[in-house]
Image: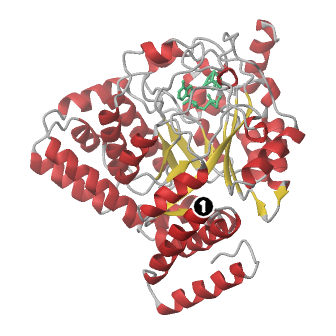
């Protein structure tokens, strides 16, 4: 157990005030609470034609302005909401096609010096059994994940000197070097504490995928109340975590807000302002992904049930839709925090990535255990990977484990450029088909194989040219003959 003095010293050594100040404008950050309230107020009772104009703008894959997002958030006409749900789905299909990317979370350490009142890992929670995986244990977890068919992970850490950048880098190296049968993890995203530019350069060099840091709440005062102590108490250090990542050459960054902490309309506006500031400073490249976790119950954490801002299912779907329409070209992540029926309802409005077969206990994949006292919160969708993949396929969504984009430099500005032109799926659908085929051959149940093979045939037929169809057919044959990791 660290003393308060030791924790304070560590925090002082990590936070570099000049790496906050360099991004401020006239000493202020880009979240102007007053501007957000005013914009929401000024765009109340939007009329039908205005909402429809805004929807058309999104359908042309243009990012919305704050006034437009505020108008959508204030819409009270259920018929228009139906139009927005439909538009969200169309936008997603235009940019990403009928693919859905799958990943799994890997929790590596729940040691944490912070006091986030909503989190089971907060330092005061004595019920939490603390654990940090050794590299042997990381390997065992990764093998268990590979043997289910996973290719992409989000690796998650508490905020503590024990899980500093060197430990995270070591973990990533272990993940990438672990092989099991014909499989391996090809993309490792990270959700961890905000870091300095120098530390982020270390993660860039070991091949980090997306670096995710969620602001949780963009509202300054609420942020202060909910993060009373620890390194996370510094709003600015967190707000600019992804600016620093971009400056460090980590091309893909993921923003997020935790819905249930404050007024959800304010949070959607915050996500948009964050996107706008990143785009402004980094040549039009905003967040690679946006996450919108909802507050879930956590062991010995009463706040998760008492917050007055908890978001109901119907409102949640609307919020996700507004995010989709506001930033049409960005990846959107819906996690297994949500129950299966919520996922069925929300995925069609524009989600691009989900996890499945997730277990968020530390060391829980290899031991196949569920222990709520080792978890940060309690999952809503505990179905296995194969079952969720099959359900997606039955609904015409092809699972993609493709990671070719990152290995061919299709990240950052290159990726955003093709995403904004609605061309990601031309490049990515063939690769989705190829990785789906690998999954069907190596890991799927007989039932999933049957549904999946039919879907592959359908998607092959839908490819834009005969020559592309032939190329992909050839590659599928090579996969059937035992080759792996083929991509265009
Ligand atoms: N410690 C790092 C941090 O706080 O950013 C990374 C890991 S934290 C385990 C990942 C995310 O889980 C947090 O950013 C927060 O949004 C989310 N989270 C925390 N408590 C939660 C809860 N009770 N329900 C749902 N999500 C929660
Ligand atoms: Fe620690 Fe992250 Fe949980 Fe906060 S949300 S207590 S920083 S693990």
Q: In which quarter of the image is residue 476?
A: bottom right
Task: Mark yes or no: residue 430 visible.
Answer: yes
Q: Position of residue 143 (x, y in %)?
A: 80, 50
Give the colour scheme shown: secondary structure
Numbered marks: total? 1
Respond yes or no on whether mark 1 lies under 8 Å from ligand 1: no
Which quarter of the rendered picture does the C terminus lie within?
A: bottom right
What residue is at 48 percent from the left and 65 percent from the top? Answer: 417
The residue under label 1 is 411
107 in relation to 420, above or below: above
Task: Mark yes or no: residue 397 visible.
Answer: no
Q: Where is residue 250 in the image (x, y as percent from the top left)?
A: 66, 50
Extreme-top residue of the structure: 4
Q: Is mark 1 on a helix, strand or loop?
A: loop
Q: Where is residue 123 in the image (x, y as percent from the top left)?
A: 69, 14
Q: In which quarter of the image is ligand 2?
A: top right
Q: Where is residue 352 in the image (x, y as percent from the top left)?
A: 47, 54
Front-lying residue, 265 or 150: 150
Front-lying residue, 56 or 13: 56
Which quarter of the rendered picture does the N terminus lie within?
A: top right
Extreme-right residue of the structure: 136
Q: On the picture, is 152 further left or further right than 412?
A: right
Q: On the picture, is 81 further left or further right than 469?
A: left
What residue is at 34 percent from the left and 38 percent from the top? Answer: 319
Q: On the picture, is 259 further left or further right than 358?
A: left
Q: On the picture, is 168 further left or further right than 262?
A: right
What residue is at 41 percent from the left and 34 percent from the top? Answer: 270
Circle 1 packing at 10 Å, graded few (<14), some (14-19), many (20+), is: some
What residue is at 57 percent from the left and 28 percent from the top? Answer: 378
425 in relation to 277, above or below: below
442 in relation to 454, above or below: above
């Amino acid at each position: 157990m660290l003393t308060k003095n030791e924790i304070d010293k560590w925090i002082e050594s990590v936070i570099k005030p000049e790496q906050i100040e360099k991004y401020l404008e006239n000493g202020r950050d880009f979240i102007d609470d007053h501007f957000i309230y005013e914009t929401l107020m000024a765009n109340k009772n939007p009329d039908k034609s205005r909402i429809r104009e805004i929807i058309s703008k999104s359908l042309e894959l243009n990012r919305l302005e704050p006034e437009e997002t505020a108008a959508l958030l204030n819409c009270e006409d259920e018929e228009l909401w139906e139009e927005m749900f439909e538009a969200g789905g169309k936008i997603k299909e235009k940019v990403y096609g009928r693919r859905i990317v799958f990943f799994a979370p890997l929790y590596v350490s729940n040691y944490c010096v912070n006091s986030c009142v909503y989190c089971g890992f907060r330092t005061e929670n004595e019920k939490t059994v603390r654990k940090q995986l050794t590299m042997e244990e990381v390997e065992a977890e990764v093998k268990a994940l590979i043997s289910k068919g996973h290719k992409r992970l989000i690796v998650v850490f508490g905020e503590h000197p024990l899980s500093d950048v060197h430990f995270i880098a070591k973990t990533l190296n272990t993940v990438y070097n672990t092989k099991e049968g014909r499989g391996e993890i090809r993309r490792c995203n990270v959700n961890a504490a905000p870091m300095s530019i120098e530390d982020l350069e270390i993660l860039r060099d070991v091949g980090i995928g997306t670096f995710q840091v969620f602001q949780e709440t963009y509202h300054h005062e609420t942020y202060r109340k909910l993060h009373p102590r620890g390194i996370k108490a510094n709003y600015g250090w967190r707000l600019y975590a992804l600016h620093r990542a971009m400056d460090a050459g980590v091309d893909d960054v993921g923003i997020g807000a935790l819905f249930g902490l404050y007024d959800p309309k304010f949070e959607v506006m915050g996500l948009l302002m964050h996107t706008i500031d990143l785009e402004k400073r980094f040549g039009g490249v905003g967040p690679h992904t946006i996450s919108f976790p909802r507050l879930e119950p956590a062991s010995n954490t009463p706040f998760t049930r008492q917050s007055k801002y908890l978001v109901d299912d119907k409102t949640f779907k609307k919020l996700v839709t507004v995010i989709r329409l506001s930033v049409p070209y960005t990846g959107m992540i819906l996690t297994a925090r949500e129950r299966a029926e919520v996922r069925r309802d929300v995925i069609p409005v524009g989600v691009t990535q989900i996890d499945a077969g997730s277990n968020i206990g530390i060391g829980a994949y290899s031991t196949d255990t569920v222990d709520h006292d080792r978890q940060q919160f309690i999952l809503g969708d505990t179905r296995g990977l194969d079952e969720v993949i099959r359900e997606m396929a039955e609904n015409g969504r092809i699972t993609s484990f493709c990671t070719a984009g990152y290995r061919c430099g299709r990240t950052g500005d290159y990726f955003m450029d093709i995403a904004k032109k609605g061309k990601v799926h031309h490049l990515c659908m063939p690769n989705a088909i190829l990785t789906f085929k690998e999954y069907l051959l190596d890991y799927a149940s007989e039932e999933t194989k049957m549904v999946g093979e039919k879907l592959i045939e359908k998607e092959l037929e839908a490819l834009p040219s005969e020559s592309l169809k032939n190329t992909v057919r050839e590659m599928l044959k090579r996969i059937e003959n035992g080759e792996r990791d083929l991509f265009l």
